[in-house]
Image (tube, grey):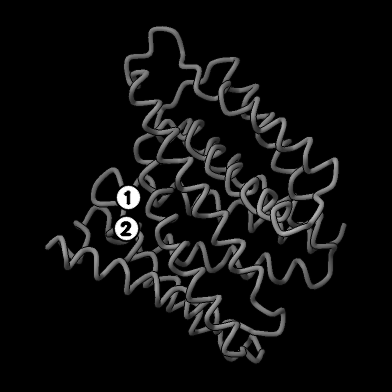
């Protein structure tokens, strides 16, 4: 077995567990504050890796990185907020699917032609999301209004993630880490500006501080695993495995957050994962 596929699975697990960690931390404090501190962790991780990743970033690469940072920062805060709202089995597949669909639709607008496989994934996504919202009978933890709010926040997060991916796709392959570093700096600056404007705290409470910081390292580790995987394996197959990240979030949420699933939600989760695979392959 090609070790690259193990790295892709590791990236998927790191992304999924990192998202859930940010969501859990956001139950204890402001999601924007969690995203700010995770940004510090990610930035430190990338700076430490600079000597190992060579590349030359053009001015255009850095500008696209900055734009990706703005979209990514807003999207990350909403991801953490949607997961904090819960249930995770609704939030995680929703923002991941929409995050994949947005670039596909954008590609059509600019003249690209996604494959029939990708469009099949989009069709499955349209079926999967309503199934995910069907609550267990008698479950008083999440009202219908709460579920609608989670879907809305997760959907907005997915749109922003989609534009983050579109912006990042314009960064040259030989740009190295600098565009990603610029993206993180822009995100941190935006979070700091928003928190200062609202006179919010700049340091999370002790119960969320360490987790928020570690989440940033998980994100960087996931990016490294993904980057190494695509060096020796087809990017389509690597992206397919990475697109399964919601499975990690959902499976961990069951014991950690005591989430209950309906049969329809489980079917929706399977459809969502298949949809993500198809869109990634297309």
Secondary structure state at the residue bearing disc 1:
helix
**Relative to residue 142, is residue 242 depicted above or below?**
below
Q: Residue at x 66, y 66 (%)?
A: 225
Residue 150 location (% of width, % of height): 40, 33
**Relative to residue 206, is residue 229 depicted above or below?**
below
Residue 224 location (% of width, % of height): 62, 70
Residue 4 location (% of width, % of height): 79, 63
Q: Residue at x 47, y 37 (%)?
A: 91
Question: Farthest left residue?
Answer: 199
Spatial CA distance of label 2 from label 1 is: 7 Å
Return the residue at label 2: 34
Return the residue at label 1: 25
Question: Farthest top residue?
Answer: 138
Counting residues from the start of the chain, the first of labels 2 and 1 encountered is: 1
Counting labels gives 2
**Which of these two is toward me, 191 or 44?**
191
**Which of these two is toward me, 222 or 114?**
114
Labels 2 and 1 touching (C-beta < 8 A): yes
In the displayed structure, does residue 240 sit left or right of residue 203? right
Q: Quadrant of residue 83?
A: top left
Label 2 environment density (alpha carbons within 10 Å; few <14, some 14–19, many ≥20): many
Residue 275 location (% of width, % of height): 71, 37
């Amino acid at each position: 077995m090609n070790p690259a596929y193990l790295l892709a699975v590791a990236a998927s697990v790191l992304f999924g567990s990192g998202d859930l960690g940010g969501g859990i931390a956001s139950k204890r404090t402001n999601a924007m504050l969690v995203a700010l501190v995770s940004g510090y962790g990610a930035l430190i991780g990338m700076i430490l890796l600079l000597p190992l990743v060579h590349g030359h970033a053009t001015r255009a690469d850095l500008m696209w990185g900055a734009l990706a940072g703005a979209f990514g920062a807003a999207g990350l805060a909403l991801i953490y907020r949607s997961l904090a709202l819960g249930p995770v089995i609704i939030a995680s597949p929703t923002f991941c699917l929409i995050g994949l669909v947005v670039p596909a639709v954008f590609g059509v607008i600019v003249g690209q032609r996604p494959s029939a496989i990708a469009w099949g994934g989009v069709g499955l996504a349209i079926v999967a999301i309503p199934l995910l919202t069907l609550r267990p009978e008698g479950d008083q933890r999440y009202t219908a209004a709460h579920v609608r709010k989670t879907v809305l926040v997760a959907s907005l997060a997915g749109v922003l993630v989609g534009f983050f991916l579109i912006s990042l796709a314009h960064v040259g392959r030989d740009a190295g880490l600098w565009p990603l570093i610029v993206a993180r700096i822009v995100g941190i600056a935006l979070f700091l500006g928003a928190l200062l404007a609202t006179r919010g705290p700049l340091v999370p409470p002790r119960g969320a501080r360490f987790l928020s910081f570690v989440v940033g390292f998980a994100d960087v580790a996931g990016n490294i695993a993904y980057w190494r995987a695509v060096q020796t394996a087809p990017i389509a197959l690597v992206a397919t495995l990475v697109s399964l990240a919601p499975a990690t979030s959902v499976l961990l949420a069951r014991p950690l957050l005591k989430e209950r699933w309906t049969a329809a939600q489980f079917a929706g989760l399977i459809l969502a994962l298949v949809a993500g695979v198809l869109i990634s392959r297309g």
